[in-house]
């Protein structure tokens, strides 16, 4: 876009450039904070996955022991009696202007009576297997919430990086070029104005070459007329004498 080189447009361009530079600083600070949160959550997820892997192995071992000592029929009957709905709530949290859903839930671990099992009539291996799987389920829900947060933070980091690149590679260089062009144009105009004023001043101060009094035709005619009238009156008086 071709913008006229005026002082007003030059000031506006400078203001826009300063705002763009401040925007880059703010976006860079935001990106650094997002990256810190990103790596913090990533480390937490890695620890959670490692613990979850151990819980899976432990739960599988407990299920195998329960099948071996109690039998598949008793294990199936216990699993049917322990069936339930898991109450969870999803809340929106705000991190650096990013809306992130988080999964909230109460403890999923229950007593044998809450599972519909009697401790005296149920194999301890089945009770241990149920408890280990409830513990594993809690870790799964925490990991799901953390991975959703990690994904949102990664997307926001990419968006902020694109904005920074657009400002640094497109907007700011364009404004810098525009400001330099306007400055050069205004400086050239100023030099032309100074030269023009000096030329006018020199022209006015220069003495005229012809110093003689200019010829005034009207004054000459009036003088001739008065001279003629005086000569007529003088001749008329001489004739009468």
Image: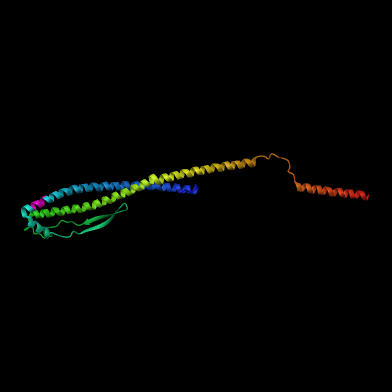
Residue placed most toward the observer, 115 or 74: 74
Residue 195 in the image: state x and y as whole percent: 57, 41
Q: Main secondary structure of the magenta part?
A: helix
| Residue 118 belongs to the span the image colors magenta | no
Q: How is the image coloured?
A: rainbow
Specify whether 103 is left or right of 218: left
- Residue located farthest toward the front when viewing the structure as drawn: 1
Q: Residue at x 24, y 51 (%)?
A: 147
Specify start and end residues of the magenta stretch as a single range. 61-66
Q: How many marks?
A: 0
Q: Residue at x 11, y 53 (%)?
A: 129
Q: Residue at x 82, y 49 (%)?
A: 226
Residue 10 in the image: state x and y as whole percent: 47, 47
| Residue 63 belongs to the span the image colors magenta | yes
Residue placed most toward the observer, 150 or 127: 150
Q: Residue at x 58, y 42 (%)?
A: 196
Residue 181 in the image: state x and y as whole percent: 47, 43
Residue 13 in the image: state x and y as whole percent: 45, 47
Specify whether 92 is left or right of 188: left
């Amino acid at each position: 876009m071709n913008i006229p080189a005026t002082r007003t447009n030059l000031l506006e361009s400078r203001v826009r450039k300063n705002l763009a530079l401040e925007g880059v600083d703010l976006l860079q600070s935001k990106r650094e904070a997002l990256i810190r949160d990103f790596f913090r959550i990533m480390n937490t997820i890695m620890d959670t996955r490692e613990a979850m892997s151990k819980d899976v192995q432990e739960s599988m071992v407990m299920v195998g022991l329960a099948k071996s000592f109690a039998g598949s029929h008793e294990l199936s009957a216990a699993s049917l009696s322990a069936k339930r709905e898991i109450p969870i709530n999803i809340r929106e949290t705000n991190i650096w202007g990013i809306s992130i859903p988080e999964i909230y839930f109460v403890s999923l671990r229950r007593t044998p009576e809450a599972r519909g099992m009697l401790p005296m009539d149920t194999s301890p291996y089945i009770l241990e297997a149920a408890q280990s799987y409830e513990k594993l389920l809690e870790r799964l829900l925490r990991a799901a919430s953390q991975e959703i947060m990690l994904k949102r933070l990664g997307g926001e980091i990419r968006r902020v990086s694109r904005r920074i690149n657009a400002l640094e590679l497109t907007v700011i260089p364009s404004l810098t070029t525009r400001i330099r062009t306007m400055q050069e144009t205004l400086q050239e105009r100023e030099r032309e104005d100074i030269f023009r004023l000096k030329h006018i001043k020199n022209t006015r101060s220069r003495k005229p070459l012809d110093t003689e009094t200019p010829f005034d035709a009207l004054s000459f005619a009036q003088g001739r007329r008065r001279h003629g009238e005086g000569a007529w009156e003088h001749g008329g008086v001489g004739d009468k004498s």
